C-alpha cells in the first residue's frame, strides 16, 4: 500500500459539480492499494501518516505531527500510484488491487484514520474526482507499507 502525503493549508474533492470532501490545514493522502495488501498495511500507513513530524514548531522545524496539531485528513483512493511505467508508453496497473479488494481496504483505512480522533474526509471511490490541493511548503512525502520490512540501510530485514 502506498500513500503520497501532501501537507496542505486546505484541500477539497469534487465529483462533477458536487463537493464530496474538504479540509482545512492538514494532510492529503492519495492512497494506492496493491494486490495482496492487508489490514496490516493500512494500519502501518495510518500510524505513519498521523505521527510523522511534518508540521512546524515555533522555530519552523518539522517537529509536530498531525496528532500534535489536530490536523484534518483528506484520504483519496488512487490506484495509479501502483502504475508500472518501465516498458512502453502506456502505464500498466496490474499491481493495483481489484476494485472490490481495494474498496474494502480503503474503507478500513478510513475507519482506522477516524479512530485517531482526527477529522477525516474522503473522495469517492472509483469516481472521476477533481482534487484541489493547496500544498503547504511544499511538503510531499511518499509512504510505502513495504518499507516496514526493509532496514534503513536499504537491505531486507533479517527474519
Image (cartoon, rainbow, N blue to C red):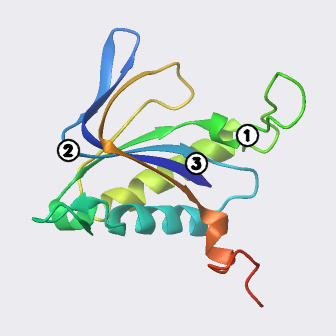
Instruction: Please state if 140 lies on the left or on the right of 57 as rendered.
Output: right
Q: Position of residue 76 (x, y in %)?
A: 46, 38
Residue 27: x and y in percent read: 32, 48
- 119 vs 109, left or right, is left
Q: Disc 1 designates what residue?
A: 98
**Does the residue at mark 3 contact the one at mark 2 (Cβ under 8 Å)?**
no
Find disc 3 in the rendering and name its residue: 104
Helix, strand or loop at disc 2? loop
Q: Earlier in the sequence, mark 1 or mark 3?
A: 1
User: Between disc 2 and disc 1, whose residue precedes?
Assistant: 2
Helix, strand or loop status at disc 3: helix
Percent x, y of residue 60: 18, 60
Q: Residue furthest left?
A: 58
**Residue where numbered disc 2 is placed:** 25
Which mark sits nearer the N-terminus, 3 or 2? 2
Q: Is residue 40 visible?
A: yes
Amino acid at each position: 500500500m502506498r500513500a503520497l502525503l501532501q501537507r496542505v493549508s486546505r484541500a477539497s474533492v469534487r465529483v462533477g459539480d458536487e463537493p464530496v470532501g474538504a479540509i482545512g490545514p492538514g494532510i492529503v493522502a492519495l492512497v494506492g492499494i496493491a494486490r495482496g495488501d492487508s489490514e496490516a498495511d493500512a494500519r502501518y500507513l495510518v500510524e505513519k501518516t498521523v505521527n510523522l513530524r511534518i508540521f512546524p514548531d515555533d522555530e519552523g522545524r518539522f517537529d509536530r505531527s498531525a496528532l500534535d496539531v489536530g490536523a484534518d485528513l483528506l484520504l483519496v483512493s488512487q490506484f495509479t500510484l501502483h502504475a508500472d511505467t518501465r516498458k512502453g508508453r502506456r502505464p500498466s496497473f496490474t499491481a493495483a488491487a481489484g476494485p472490490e479488494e481495494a474498496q474494502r481496504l480503503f474503507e478500513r483505512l478510513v475507519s482506522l484514520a477516524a479512530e485517531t480522533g482526527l477529522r477525516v474526509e474522503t473522495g469517492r471511490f472509483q469516481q472521476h474526482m477533481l482534487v484541489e490541493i493547496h500544498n503547504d511548503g511544499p511538503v510531499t512525502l511518499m509512504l510505502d507499507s513495504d518499507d516496514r520490512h526493509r532496514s534503513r540501510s536499504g537491505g531486507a530485514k533479517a527474519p
